[in-house]
Image (cartoon, grey):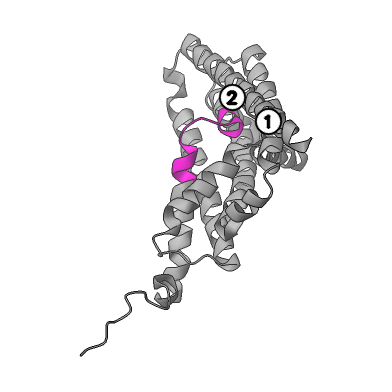
């Protein structure tokens, strides 16, 4: 009588694949996650980049986007390497990050509601300024740091990338190692930066077709949306601390 074969393969499908394919899969997956995840204007960084693009400050918007992409890629790399299990053992991190996120969402929402949102009338104003004088290095670093900070304390990134990684974990197509986590993070950074570059390019080309009243309504709406996110983050963190206080007694 023939012996029954064990249907469970010992080596995973990812480790059997060629090295180039093992390298490309997390790179492409990271690019897709970063690009598609940045399309909705649902965070402070994307809202700020949109604001600067409408105002004709394309270089400032792009440098802030690069800073945000680096910070988001860091979260993505940690999630790929196994941040989900670490987060389960350190439950205080998420509510603390929500407190920081509530502060950031509220401040940026107030800026959007109070600031002058009039776009630049000259589409080539920044280009003409760039020809006359090179943008100071300190301003570029400041914009990158602003993007790093806004995305760095965005609590949605903690959950979104952990959930995204969990959705592909069971496929067996990806190998979860530290090196490939770095590759995945590079893909995310490229995907996020590519989307914002396309967004700013579209704004530069078609911004003049938008009426000032329409732009003002869009930006005020984003301000109200960010304020709502700030209130939700504050409520969520408050509920956590209130529910945890009886357990500590």
Magenta stretch holds residue 42: yes
Residue 197 image offset from top left, x and y in percent: 51, 40
Above or below, comparing residue 24 to residue 162 in the picture: below
Marks 2 and 1: which is nearer the front?
A: 1
Q: Is the magenta stretch mostly helix, strand or loop?
A: helix
Q: Quadrant of residue 210?
A: top left
Q: Which of marks 2 and 1 is nearer the N terminus?
A: 2
Instruction: Give the x, y percent position of residue 63.
Output: 63, 40
Q: Residue at x 62, y 18 (%)?
A: 112
Residue 95 in the image: above or below residue 124: below
User: Circles 2 and 1: CB distance less than 8 Å?
Assistant: no
Which quarter of the rendered picture does the C terminus lie within? Answer: top right
Tell me the crowding category of disc 1: few under 14, some 14 to 19, or many 20 or more residues within 10 angstroms, Cα based.
few
Q: Nearer the viewer, residue 70 or 106?
A: 106
The answer to which image quadrant residue 92 occupies is top right
For image coordinates 47% across by 32% down, the residue present is 40
Which residue bears the numbered disc 2? Answer: 229
Horizontal and vertical percent for residue 102?
A: 67, 27
- Position of residue 121 measured from the top left corner of the image (x, y, whole percent): 54, 17
Question: Over which residues does the magenta segment extend?
Answer: 34-47
Q: Quadrant of residue 1?
A: bottom left
Q: Is residue 194 left or right of residue 67?
A: left
Please give left or right for residue 146 compared with residue 249 in the image. Answer: left
Whether residue 120 appears in this view of the structure is no
Q: Which of 125 and 148 is in front in this view?
A: 148
Q: Is mark 1 on a helix, strand or loop?
A: helix
Image vertical order of residue 13 relative to residue 247, above or below? below
Q: How many marks?
A: 2
Q: What element carries label 2?
A: helix
Examine the structure image and report whether residue 133 is included in the region drawn in magenta: no
Q: Mark 1 points at which residue?
A: 243
Q: Distance between the residues labelled 2 and 1?
A: 21 Å
């Amino acid at each position: 009588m023939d012996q029954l074969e064990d249907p469970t393969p010992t080596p995973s499908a990812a480790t059997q694949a060629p090295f180039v394919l093992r390298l490309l899969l997390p790179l492409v997956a990271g690019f897709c996650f970063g690009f598609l995840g940045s399309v909705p204007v649902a965070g402070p960084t994307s809202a700020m980049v949109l604001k600067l693009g409408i105002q004709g400050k394309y270089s400032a918007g792009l440098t802030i986007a690069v800073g945000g992409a680096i910070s988001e890629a860091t979260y993505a790399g940690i999630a790929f390497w196994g941040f989900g299990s670490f987060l389960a053992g350190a439950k205080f991190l998420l509510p603390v990050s929500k407190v920081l996120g509530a502060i950031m969402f509220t401040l940026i929402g107030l800026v959007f509601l109070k600031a002058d949102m009039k776009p630049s009338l000259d589409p080539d104003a920044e280009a003409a300024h760039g020809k006359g004088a090179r943008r100071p290095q300190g301003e570029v670093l400041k914009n990158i740091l602003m993007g790093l900070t806004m995305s760095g304390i965005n609590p949605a990134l903690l959950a979104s990338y952990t959930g995204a990684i969990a959705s592909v974990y069971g496929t067996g197509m990806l190998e979860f190692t530290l090196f490939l986590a770095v590759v995945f993070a590079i893909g995310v950074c490229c995907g996020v930066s590519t989307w914002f570059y396309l967004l700013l390019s579209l704004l530069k080309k078609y911004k003049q077709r938008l009426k000032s009243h329409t732009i003002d309504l869009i930006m005020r709406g984003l301000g109200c949306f960010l304020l709502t996110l700030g209130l939700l983050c504050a409520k969520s963190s408050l509920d956590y601390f209130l529910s945890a206080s009886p357990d500590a007694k």
